[in-house]
Image (cartoon, helix red, strand yellow):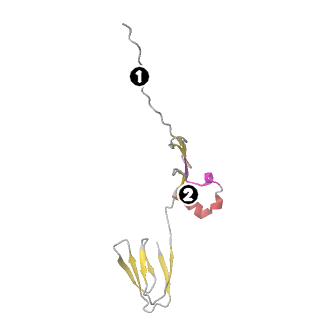
Amino acid sequence: MPNFTSWSGSCLTSFFEVIDMSVDEQEVANQGSPVQLPAGYYKVSIPETGNATISYDNRYSDISYNFYNQLGQLVGSIAPEGVKAILNNGIMAYPTFASVPFRTTYEYDLLQGRLIANTQTDAGKTEFIRVKVITLTLKRPILL
């Protein structure tokens, strides 16, 4: 949740306006003191004659990473729990992608670019086999 922790400066009217842009530009604050707001998309307006300093904390949750090759194929992903582990322990704690927790890798065939396998940290490797069904019609001469 964004947390506007301090407002300072030489704002002649000590007035600012915080507008919630996701709700038809509805005004949510109209004052010169700290404001706490839920996560959202906001616009802060300060009179042209004034100066202000804005500071806030930004917290994110449920971040995931996806990695693609030059063909646009998804080749790896890290689920939110894996991202939390990286943020908590540091990237240096995981020297290879294989050591990252809660990750998935994807493999494709070279000819048609179809997914042939994926490997998940907790579920192991899953391979996909495609079988092409061929219908054969056999002809033989009829003896009279």
Disc 2 to disc 1, how far (Cα)?
53 Å
Which percent across, then down, holds residue 101? 58, 54
| Residue occupying the point 44% across, 29% down | 134
Which percent across, then down, holds residue 97? 61, 53
- The magenta stretch is 96-106
Mark 2 or 1, closer to the camera: 1
Q: Which residue is mark 1?
A: 137
Which percent across, then down, holds residue 13? 42, 91
Given residues 55 and 142, the one toward you in this image is 142
Q: Which residue is mark 2?
A: 82
Amino acid type, residue under disc 1 in the picture: Thr
Q: Quadrant of residue 22?
A: bottom left
Given residues 75 and 79, the one toward you in this image is 75
Location of residue 74 with respect to 44 vertically, above or below: above
First in sequence: mark 2 vs mark 1: 2
Given residues 74 and 126, the one toward you in this image is 74
